[in-house]
Image: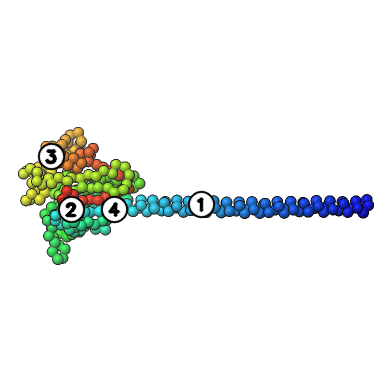
Amino acid sequence: MNLSSRRASSTLTLSFTVLLLASTGITRRRRRVSHSLTSKSITSTYTRFKVSFFLVICFFIFWMLKGSYGSTFTFANRCGYTVWPGILSNAGSPTLSTTGFELPKGTSRSLQAPTGWSGRFWARTGCKFDSSGSGTCKTGDCGSNAVECAGLGAAPPVTLAEFTLGTGGDDFYDVSLVDGYNIPMIVEVAGGSGQCASTGCTTDLNIQCPAELRFGDGDACKSACLAFRSPEYCCSGAYATPSSCRPSVYSEMFKAACPRSYSYAYDDATSTFTCAGGDYTVTFCPSSPR
C-alpha cells in the first residue's frame, strides 16, 4: 500500500473512530438524560405515595380516635327555672365525669361518653341544696342528698332519656315515660349516619294529667304502673310478655301527646331510634321561649 493509500485509510479509520466516539457520547448523554427523567419520575411518584400514605394514616388515626372518643352529650335548659340533670350509668358502663350538676335556665353543658357506654339522663326540679351541697329535689330526686347522684337512679315519676352507644355499629336511644313524666324533653342528633331522628316529648303532660296520676302539687304525672301497682299496668307477672301486656287508656293518653316516646314497657316499635357515630343534645323544656 502506498503512502496516499495509507493516509486515506488512516483518515477513514479516524473518521470512523470519531463518529463512533460521537455516537457513544450521544448515547451516553441520552442515557443520562433518560436516567435523570426516570429518577425524577420515580421521585415524584414516591412523593405522591408518601403524601397518600400519610393521609391514609391520618384518617385511620382520626377514625380510631373517634371510635374510642364515643359521643358528646350536650344538655340545654330552656325552662324558665333551674334544673339539676341526673346521670346514671348502667351496670358495666364507666361513670362519666359527673353524675349530676346544676343547670341554670338558658345555659348548656357538654359531657363526653366513650364508645359502648349506656345509661340514662333526667332533670331534677324544685331542688334545694344548702351551702354544703346537701339537699333534695321535688321531682327526679336520686336519694343521694347531694348534687351528684353518685350511682343512684331517679325516683319516679320522671322523664328519662336512655342511651346505648354502639361499638362500631348503631347507637340506640329513646325518651321514656314508662316511669312517668316530670318535664318536657327532646333528644336531637348532630352528625352521624343512619336514621338519626329526633325524639322526645314537648307536651306539658302535667297540665292534662288525670287526677289519679297527679304527683304532689301537679309537679309531675305518674305512670299507671306507679299509681296502681297492678301487673296489667306494670307488664309483670301474667302480663310480662308483649302479647299479654297491651296499652292502657293511660299509656294511650301519653302516646297521643308524645307519639315518639315510650308510653309503656313494650312500646318499642315507634319509640326506639338509632344512629351511628352521632353527638346528642338533650333539651329540657324545648318549647319554651328562648
Q: Is residue 50 visible?
A: yes
Image depth: mark 1 or mark 3 in front: 1
Say above or below: 269 vs 53: above
* Residue that badge 2 annotates: 290
Do the residues bearing badges 4 and 1 touch, measured as CB atoms within 8 Å? no
Question: Of the residues under marks 1 and 2, which one precedes in the sequence?
Answer: 1
Q: CA distance from mark 1 to mark 3?
A: 64 Å
Return the x and y of residue 141 as percentages of the image width and height. 15, 54
What is the spatial separation of the Cα atoms under label 3 and label 4, in whole angstroms?
A: 33 Å
Q: Which residue is mark 1?
A: 48
SS of the residue under disc 4: strand
Number of marks present in the image shown: 4
Tell me the distance, in whole angstroms, between the alpha carbons under discs 2 and 4.
23 Å
Name which residue lies at 42% across and 51% down: 60
Disc 1 is placed on an element classified as: helix
- Image position of 145 (left or right of 41): left
